[in-house]
Amino acid sequence: MKTQSSLTIAMRAEQRRRWVRAPRAQLIVGLFTGILVVALGASHPNEPTAPHGPPSDRSVEHWQKTWSDVLARHVDAQGRVDFSGLGNDRAGLDDVVRFIAAVDPMSSPDLFPTQNSRLAYYIDAYNALAMYGVLDAGVPKRFGLLGRIRFFVLRKFVIGGRTLSLYRFENNVIRPLGDPRVHFALNCMSVSCPRLPQSAFTADALDQELDAAAREFVAEQRNVTVDSERREVRISAIFKFYTQDFLAQSPDLLSYINRYRSAPIPTNYKVVFADYDWSINDQRAREKN
C-alpha cells in the first residue's frame, strides 16, 4: 500500500509539472473552449450545418445566378434581409449552400482558375453561409458575446467537402489572400456589417465591385464621421478588428480610408472607433425601429 501511494503521488506530481509546462495560450484556449461548450450546450460543436443532398447544378454560373436570385428577392436596397420571406422561400438558398458544400477552389481548382474567381467565390460563399446560418438558428435578434462564439466559432459548415467555422473560413482562407477590400464585402448579417448587395460578386468585375464597396462603405456617415472642430474621426470597428490587414497596404488607417474618399481626412486627426451593432439586420425588425 505504501508503494502504491508513493507511485500515485509521483504520477500526480508529474501531471502537475506537465500542466505548468504547457503553453499558457494553449491552456487558456483549452479551458475556455471546454467551458463554452458546456455553457452553450454545444454537445456536438463539430457537427456541420448544411441541407442534405447534392446541388442541382455544379456549374459556377448556375450557382452565382441562384445566389443573385436569392439576394434580389430577399435583400432590399439598404442591404436588409427579409428573413421571414426567406424562411418561406428557401429552396434557392438551400441549393446555394449545397453547391458550397460540394464545390470550392480547393476541391475543384479547374472551376476557379484565377485569383479573382477564387476570391469572388469565397466572398459569396461566406455571405450565403452567414445568411443560411442565421435562418437555421431561428433568426436571433442579435449576436451577444456567447451567441457570437456559438455562431462564428462552434457552428460548422461544409465547404468543398471540408468542415469549417465561419471564423476559420474568414481567417484561414479569405484573409490570407491579402485583399483588405474583402472587409467591405463580407457580411455576417449584423447591422454594422457592410451593405449586403442584391447580386453576387463576380470574377470578371471583382476589382470594380470591391472598389465600389469600399467607396460606399467609407462614404457612409455611420462608418466614417469627421469632426473638424475636434480634429477627430470616428470610424467603424471593422477598421479595429482588421487593422493589420489595412496597415499591410497603408502607413495608417486614415491614409487607407482616404484612398476611397472624395474628401480626404487629415491624417493627423485622432481616430476613435465606433461601437459595433451586432443586431441581426432583419428587414422587418429594422423597419420597426
Image (tube, grey):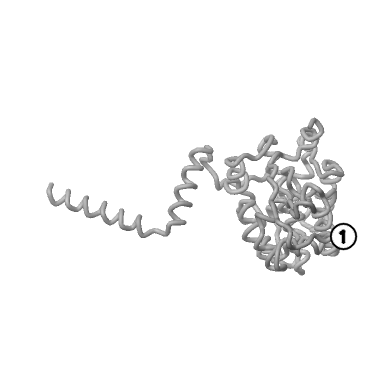
Q: Is residue 276 above or below residue 208?
A: above
Q: Is residue 254 left or right of residue 6?
A: right
- For the C terminus, give its image quadrant: top right
Q: Is residue 117 left or right of residue 145?
A: right
Secondary structure found at label 1: loop
In terms of depth relative to the viewer, which is nearer, 53 or 244? 244
- Residue 56 seen by the camera: no
- Residue at image x 69%, y 45%? 276
Specify the amino acid type for callout 1: Ser
- Residue at image x 45%, y 48%? 31
Q: Quadrant of residue 151?
A: top right
Q: Quadrant of residue 52?
A: top right
> Circle 1 is placed at which residue position?
262
Disc 1 packing (10 Å; few <14; some 14–19; many ≥20): few
- Residue 114 seen by the camera: yes
Q: Is residue 147 above or below residue 165?
A: above
Q: How many numbered circles does the render carry?
A: 1
- Residue at image x 26%, y 51%? 12
- Residue 115 lies, in percent from the top left, at 75, 68
- Residue 170 lies, in percent from the top left, at 66, 56
In terms of depth relative to the viewer, which is nearer, 219 or 137? 219
In terms of depth relative to the viewer, which is nearer, 127 or 149? 149
- Residue 51 lies, in percent from the top left, at 68, 44
Outermost residue, left side: 2
Q: Quadrant of residue 123?
A: bottom right
